[in-house]
Amino acid sequence: MGRKRLQESTDGRPTVHTVAARAGVSIASASRVLNGVGGSPETIRKVRAAAAEVGYVPNAIARSLQSQRTGLLALAVEDIGNPVYVAMMRAIEAVVAASGRQLLVHATGGRIDNETALLRRLANRYVDGMILSPIRVTDDHLAAMVDSPVPVVVIGQLGADAPVDNVRTDSRQGVALAVAHLVAAGRRRIGFVNGPLDTVPGAARDAGFRAALAEHGIELDERLVEVGDFQYAAGRSAAERLLARARPDALICANDLIAVGALHALLAAGHRVPEDVAVVGMDDTELAQMMFPQLSSVSLGSAERGRRAAELLLSRIADPALPPRREQVPPSLAVRASSRAAVPGPRPAGAASAGTGSELPSPAVVNEEVDR
Amino acid sequence: MGRKRLQESTDGRPTVHTVAARAGVSIASASRVLNGVGGSPETIRKVRAAAAEVGYVPNAIARSLQSQRTGLLALAVEDIGNPVYVAMMRAIEAVVAASGRQLLVHATGGRIDNETALLRRLANRYVDGMILSPIRVTDDHLAAMVDSPVPVVVIGQLGADAPVDNVRTDSRQGVALAVAHLVAAGRRRIGFVNGPLDTVPGAARDAGFRAALAEHGIELDERLVEVGDFQYAAGRSAAERLLARARPDALICANDLIAVGALHALLAAGHRVPEDVAVVGMDDTELAQMMFPQLSSVSLGSAERGRRAAELLLSRIADPALPPRREQVPPSLAVRASSRAAVPGPRPAGAASAGTGSELPSPAVVNEEVDR
DNA sequence: CAAACTCCCGGAAACGTTTACAGCAATCAG
DNA sequence: CTGATTGCTGTAAACGTTTCCGGGAGTTTG
């Protein structure tokens, strides 16, 4: 039968050999035509015809083995259910798709061993690069990123001298925006529902909260600070614990999921929002706008950070010799119903007030948004 | 300098050649040891030591080329931001990861050309199989699935005779559950906010709604039916259009995102939920529990469907000769505050009523849930 | 003690592609 | 008319792995 290879195995899918044989040319010519480089008009015609007849589709694995590129990029985040990562993912996917590549998504659960395992596995060359948004960073971790065999871009805070492409925001300043807004609205007993303090964002937000209070000359009541994790359920129970021992007139929450949990805890306990307690979340996700009342939230530019990270990754793949870069996306505040200044007194029965509440002048830095 | 291959290129990563040379054995022996099949104790020791010294990591692409498997599975859904797909994805990912594989996620935007392109691309063998949850199905589409070169499992309705592994639910019956629940609670002017009628779920839910009303002897007022798409914003504006021309005492929404939009439209227009208008969503996502008031929702077993689809896919990969299978997951109804029977009269000021509303006996099929 | 069997090893083929290289014909310049 | 240039083409190597196969050494069996 076949002289060198069993290219005629009746069951197998057509390869470039099949096409070449059918067109009566060599596999080199067939490959050239199929890749659009070279070939005489006659050869091109024959090869194209043969390829169409047998329904040839190039084998991406073999091509990758030869070209040393897979066209796959990975994204690793803690929790794909968190809407902040959905926003990031969407932005990243747009850039990645526009470059003709595909995105592989990993959920790490925030566990370090998971992430380092992922980084080590990069050595098997299954993806061309990776975007990582770690919430905990150890030296091990960092080392694995630095000597990773494929480019890695980090979304989030890293040590100042880490030679890793990095796009970050300033969540301390983000918390400061929220505090300034609430103080300007006359709130003084400001509580804080945070995520774990051993995470990078948790620690930064805690520090930011304390610094901002101090700056406004407000003494911190430790009973107004509570910690859970970055999920809805934990946010709700953390807020319940806080409310059981203290009477805040505002709550800042370390992300929107926590804020939604806190909102539930408040409403279930009979507090009015924002009249009795104002609520401000962080991340400014779609969820914030879906809540009722709509949630004020500190935007940390998730989509923008995602977009920039993807661009950093692509440029590094194009030129691995580039020096490490760091980009910063500034936070901003979206003020919505959950923290608008309230008319004092009991709530008028049955009247919804979305978008119609009385407005107070907001600080300059605040990015006022209309309802919806 | 290397005799056959340039395995000593100082920059390149170590290959099995490097390890074999260093251990003083053939690449065949090295490969066998590294795969844990065969090898004398002494060889095993030498190869393991050599591999550790050079930090050898097998190249997954080359392995895939040889083994004809990549260990990658794809999932294609309309919108990764929709929490119903997040739930599905989580369930699928769990099964996939447990089998030692990885999941590649695609967002199709519901566009058919996107999905068929994806199906055609399967021929390049970059993934071992795919789970597809299409919201529109054409003959072209179906043909591409049937003669796909790699296994495809569909989540959703397909033609009865389609020879494709398929896990579905009965969303007509799901709508019927919602209608029965509302009718039992005394609602009569039941509205319906649907997604596009040219989608499979949209059409099924429309049919289910009409059939269920007829079964309860309620004549349908067409002004109570409105169509948008399956997103939050569209749901909100569809509900606004509906409310501008009709006065429902209940709204069934074709998914939870629409339901949240409808909730906003209702509250912004000054209606009380559930006192004036009850709201029931579909998919029973996390979002439903996060809303205030918490949303009643028809569970279509998303996580379960995802889990089963993943299992079907794995079993088909293991044995491609299996006959096409179809599995069905029954819908159920989670009743929450948004449709609980209300005390007539004005709402008591300032009193939150989550989980404390008066309870009415619910139909047997209804799966009553407590407020968290 | 010879034959059969088991175990381990190395050479080489195979997976399907791209591409360096050399050969060859045709066209161009002198 | 001859030599250089251009444009195609085919052979074969390469990417890095797994695996078939044959051979050799050691062990068991008759």
Image: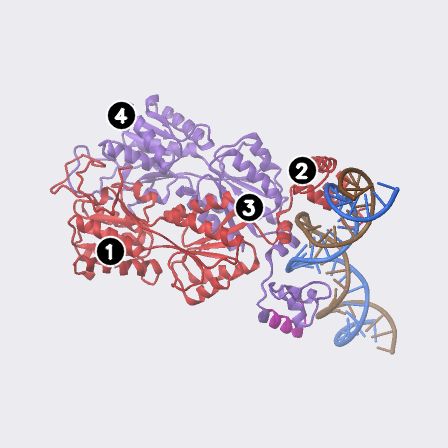
Chain colours: A red, B purple, C brown, D blue
Q: Which residue sits furthest left? A: A345
Three-letter residue code for mark 3 = Leu
Marks 4, 1: nearer the viewer: 1
Q: Residues under labels 4 and 1: Cα distance?
A: 42 Å
Residue linked to disc 2: A55
Which class describes the residues within 10 Å of circle 3: few (<14), some (14-19), or many (20+)? many
Q: Residues under labels 4 and 2: Cα distance?
A: 57 Å
Which class describes the residues within 10 Å of circle 4: few (<14), some (14-19), or many (20+)? some
Marker disc for residue B313: 3
Residue linked to disc 4: B247
Q: Nearer the viewer, residue A279 or B304?
A: A279
Which class describes the residues within 10 Å of circle 1: few (<14), some (14-19), or many (20+)? many
C-beta proximity under 8 Å, tags 2 and 1: no
Q: Chain of mark 1?
A: A
Query: Magenta part mainly helix, strand or loop?
Result: helix
Residue linked to disc 1: A192
Task: Return the disc, 2 or 1, that comes first in the chain's sequence.
Answer: 2
Q: Residues under labels 1 and 3: Cα distance?
A: 46 Å
Marks 3, 2: nearer the viewer: 2
C-beta proximity under 8 Å, tags 4 and 2: no
Three-letter residue code for mark 4 = Arg
Report the span colored magenta.
B38-51
Residue B67 locus on image (x, y percent): 65, 54
Q: Secondary structure at mark 1?
A: strand
Residue C13 locus on image (x, y percent): 76, 55
C-beta proximity under 8 Å, tags 3 and 4: no
Three-letter residue code for mark 1 = Phe
Instruction: Report which quarter residue A35 is drawn in.
Output: top right
